[in-house]
Image (tube, helix red, strand yellow):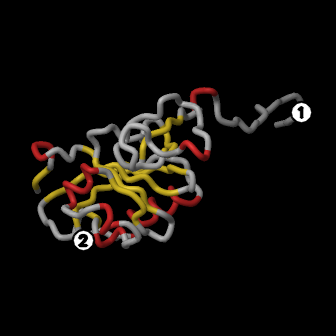
């Protein structure tokens, strides 16, 4: 059987399409209020105009928190740099006490048998190299029987991980 005259389809590298583009938005790192415009703020104008306490951060629009969400901002060393009022309420700790503390003093993987490296790896990746959205189930470090779904994404500047604790209103907590 001769191969002369037969053609094989050509393989070609297909890069991301227009559908793969991710929208980004600015929000306050304390109250989650959206920035007045979706344009990058001037470096001297990054303090939230609504609460006056948080710095404006940029994150994927599908990961950005709402003012009702509990969220934390964590660096690649797993240290907390900011947290919302809702996170303060949920974790029963004030932001002033939590800042520059290890995340493991506030949140741990929800399953006792789970490997914490998956949660830590998602945070480290978001804080250093990856712009993808990931999820994990976590719980407050001192509370058992509660599972909270965490949405983990990149935010900044400076580059850090945004951890949004989904469904954290008291009726929404999932008891095991």
**Which residue is nearer to you in this view: 43 or 6?**
43
Which badge, 1 or 2, comes first in the chain's sequence? Answer: 1
Mark 1 closeness class: few <14, some 14–19, many ≥20 residues within 10 Å:
few
**Which residue is nearer to you in this view: 98 or 42?**
42
Give the number of the disc on residue 38.
none
Q: Quadrant of the N terminus?
A: top right
**Residue beneath the point at 24% across and 49% down:** 86
Give me the C-alpha separation between circle 1 and circle 2.
Answer: 60 Å
Q: Which residue is mark 2?
A: 113
Label 1 SS: loop
* Image coords of residue 130 (percent x, y): 56, 53
* Image coords of residue 162 (percent x, y): 43, 52
11 relative position to 41: left or right: right
* Image coords of residue 103 (percent x, y): 35, 68
Label 2 SS: loop
37 relative position to 175: left or right: right
* Image coords of residue 80 (percent x, y): 40, 64
Identify the image quadrant of residue 166.
Answer: top left
**Residue beneath the point at 42% across and 69% down:** 79
- 83, above or below 171, in the image: below
**Which residue is nearer to you in this view: 15 or 126?**
126
**Which residue is nearer to you in this view: 43 or 80?**
43
Residue mark closest to the camera, 1 vs 2: 2
Q: Quadrant of the C terminus?
A: bottom left
**Residue beneath the point at 46% across and 64% down:** 121
State if disc 2 and disc 1 touch (CB < 8 Å). Answer: no
**Residue beneath the point at 69% across and 36% down:** 15
Q: Which residue is mark 1?
A: 4
Mark 2 closeness class: few <14, some 14–19, many ≥20 residues within 10 Å:
few
């Amino acid at each position: 059987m001769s191969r002369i005259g037969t053609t094989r389809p050509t393989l070609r590298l297909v890069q991301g399409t227009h559908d793969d583009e991710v929208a980004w938005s600015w929000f306050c790192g304390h109250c989650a209020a959206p920035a007045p415009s979706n344009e990058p703020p001037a470096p001297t104008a990054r303090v939230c105009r609504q609460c006056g306490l948080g710095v404006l951060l940029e994150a994927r629009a599908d990961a950005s928190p709402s003012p009702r969400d509990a969220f934390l901002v964590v660096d690649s060393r797993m240290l907390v740099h900011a947290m919302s009022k809702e996170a303060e309420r949920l974790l029963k700790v004030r932001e002033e006490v939590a800042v520059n503390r290890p995340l493991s003093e506030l949140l741990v993987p929800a399953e006792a048998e789970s490997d914490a490296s998956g949660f830590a790896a998602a945070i480290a990746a978001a804080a250093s190299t990856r712009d993808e959205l990931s999820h994990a189930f976590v719980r407050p470090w001192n509370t058992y029987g509660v599972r909270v779904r965490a949405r983990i994404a990149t935010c900044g500047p400076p580059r850090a991980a945004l951890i949004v604790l989904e469904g954290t209103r008291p009726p929404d907590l999932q008891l095991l």
